[in-house]
Structures are given as C-alpha cells and as structure tokens.
Image (cartoon, rainbow, N blue to C red):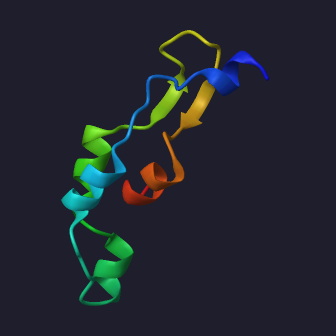
Amino acid sequence: MNGLEKCDHGISFDAHEASEILGKWEPRDDVEFIAGNPAAEEIRRRWPRLYGLCPKGCGYNGIYYASHEHYVMGDW
C-alpha cells in the first residue's frame, strides 16, 4: 500500500444529508431525465470533488470522489 491509498485528499461527503437534499425527485419527461435533478448542483457545491493536485500534498493529481455515492448524487 502506498501513500495515495491512505490519503482522503481532503474530500468528504455525507450521503444521508445529500439524500435529503435530493429528495424524492422524479423526472416528468425525457428532457428532465437528461438534465438531471436540479438539486445535484447543491450537492456539487457543498461537497466538491477534487480536480487537480491533492491539497494535502500526497502527490495525487486527478479527479477524486469521496465515494461512489458522491459521484452519483452529484450527477457528475
């Protein structure tokens, strides 16, 4: 195991709180489905993904999500 696997890169996510923000949204048509849940913007604002160098200095450079749920709920 190397240092990259241990570092969280300063990224966090609260799936329970995000779920409450997203609510029980159901798209009304194909256009809304493609556009996605408008509340996803709030998820991306509150819990941004890493894009670039790790601010903690571990050497990671790339895109990083706290979890699969973070990726899905943020609709990236």
Q: Position of residue 55 (x, y in %)?
A: 47, 15
Horizontally, residue 30 falls left or right of residue 60, namely left
* Residue at 47% from the left image edge and 32% from the top image edge: 50
Outermost residue toward the top in this view: 57
Q: Quadrant of the N terminus?
A: top right
Give whichever of 22, 45 is nearer the camera: 22
Horizontally, residue 39 falls left or right of residue 57, namely left
Give whichever of 35, 60 is nearer the camera: 60
Outermost residue toward the front in this view: 16
Q: Position of residue 20 (x, y in %)?
A: 21, 60
Can you say whether 37 is above or below 64 in the image?
below
How many badges with numbers are in the image?
0
Outermost residue toward the right in this view: 1
Can you say whether 45 is above or below 19 in the image?
above
Q: Quadrant of residue 76?
A: bottom left
Outermost residue toward the bottom in this view: 29
* Residue at 38% from the left image edge and 76% from the top image edge: 34
Q: Position of residue 8 (x, y in %)?
A: 53, 26
Q: Position of residue 10 (x, y in %)?
A: 44, 23
* Residue at 53% from the left image edge and 53% from the top image edge: 68
